């Protein structure tokens, strides 16, 4: 029988429920947060509630074709809102920038690396240590590159316009299986997911920021709870990592400012860098592209880590000044 305990000024029950999707990666994320909570409260009982989402069930169409962001979060969030669970863990890049009424992101734990990874069919010989751009250059003309992301497709076509972008859905194991079975010559996946599942050995190379910018929030987790649940919020505050929070807030505000969605090739990456006076500055780079990769607009700026929204506005205005609005229109040529 769970017993109440004191957490700061709050008296709380020492049992919580985490709503999670059932994929291996989602379960890893939920187990990771369970371990982090229990490490801080050894007597805490944590139960997982597995929920199926639309994104898990519809695998024969691209994300952009079935509604984009929210496909992996809606049903999980409903478990919070109706009280079946106390918190949930999302891959931040799957979370819409508009907050769900009644819920809040209470913690951004330390971020995994945000980069995309290039995976090659075993039949394609390559030297260890080659850059992703060099390996992309080695692919025969017309090679099939699998990705579920318009953002990745746009940037890959900007590197090699003669490649064939093939929609690739399903969990990480499914995507790997298609690559190894010869259905694809190469695939691009988030490095963070591969690392978390112990599949890093399949990575041929990591894309640099100059080659392929990641999705807003890629590699980061978002731990969400109900607004007003002060006990859970206090627990989750212990997991929050300020440098990650500052970086992803800048990325997400830029995404929101430009109206980015799964329908738009838009990318952003923020990181802390050492400033000229020895203090830390937040550096944000972003891109907006056309689906065919013929147009790729980039902008970057540095600012105070305490003002991530202001930095995002600066970079967004720079992109709009280059003509990004034409690429962001919902009726733009696809």
Image: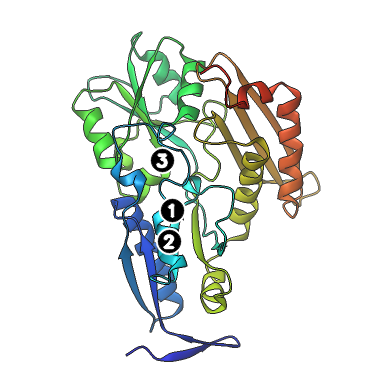
Closer to viewer: mark 1 or mark 3: 1
Distance from the alpha carbon under mark 3 to that under mark 2: 29 Å
User: Which residue is disc 3 drawn over?
Assistant: 191
Does residue 271 appear in this view?
no
Give the image quarter of residue 138: top left
Q: Do the residues labelled 3 and 2 touch (CB within 8 Å)?
A: no
The residue lying toward the viewer, choosing from 273 and 44, is 44
User: Callout 1 environment at 10 Å: few (<14), some (14 to 19), or many (20+)?
Assistant: some
In this rendering, would 249 be left or right of 306? left
Q: Tally the marks.
A: 3
The residue singled out by tag 1 in the image is 74
Q: Kindly state the secondary structure of the residue where label 1 is placed.
A: helix
Q: How far apart are marks 1 and 3 (CA)?
A: 25 Å
- Residue 56 percent across, percent down from the top left: 31, 46
Q: Which residue is drawn at 76% across and 25% down?
A: 321
For label 2, the SS is helix
């Amino acid at each position: 029988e769970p017993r109440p305990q004191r957490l700061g000024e709050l008296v709380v029950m020492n049992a919580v429920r985490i709503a999670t999707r059932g994929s291996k990666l989602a379960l890893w994320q939920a187990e990771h947060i369970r371990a982090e909570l229990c490490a801080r409260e050894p007597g805490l009982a944590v139960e997982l509630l597995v929920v199926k989402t639309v994104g898990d069930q519809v695998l024969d169409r691209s994300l952009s074709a079935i509604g984009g962001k929210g496909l992996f979060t809606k049903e999980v969030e409903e478990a919070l809102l109706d009280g079946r669970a106390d918190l949930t863990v999302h891959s931040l890049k799957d979370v819409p920038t508009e907050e769900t009424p009644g819920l809040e992101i209470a913690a951004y734990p330390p971020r995994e690396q945000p980069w995309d990874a290039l995976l090659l069919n075993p039949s394609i010989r390559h030297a260890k240590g080659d850059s992703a751009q060099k390996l992309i250059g080695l692919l025969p003309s017309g090679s099939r590159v699998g990705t579920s992301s318009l953002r990745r497709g746009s940037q890959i076509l900007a590197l090699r316009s003669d490649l064939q972008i093939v929609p690739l859905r399903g969990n990480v194991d499914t995507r790997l299986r298609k690559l190894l079975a010869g259905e694809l010559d190469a695939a691009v996946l988030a490095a963070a997911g591969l690392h978390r599942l112990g599949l890093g050995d399949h990575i041929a190379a990591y894309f640099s920021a100059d080659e392929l910018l990641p999705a807003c929030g890629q590699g980061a987790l978002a731990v969400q709870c109900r607004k007003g649940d002060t006990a859970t919020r206090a627990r989750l505050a212990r997991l929050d990592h300020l440098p990650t929070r500052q970086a992803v807030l800048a990325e997400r505000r830029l995404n929101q400012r430009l109206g980015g969605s799964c329908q738009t090739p838009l990318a952003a990456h923020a990181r802390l860098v050492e400033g000229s006076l020895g203090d830390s500055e937040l550096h944000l780079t972003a891109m907006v592209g056309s689906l065919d990769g013929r147009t790729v607009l980039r902008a970057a700026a540095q600012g105070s880590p305490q003002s991530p929204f202001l930095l995002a506005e600066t970079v967004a205005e720079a992109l709009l000044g280059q003509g990004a609005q034409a690429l962001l229109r919902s009726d733009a040529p696809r």
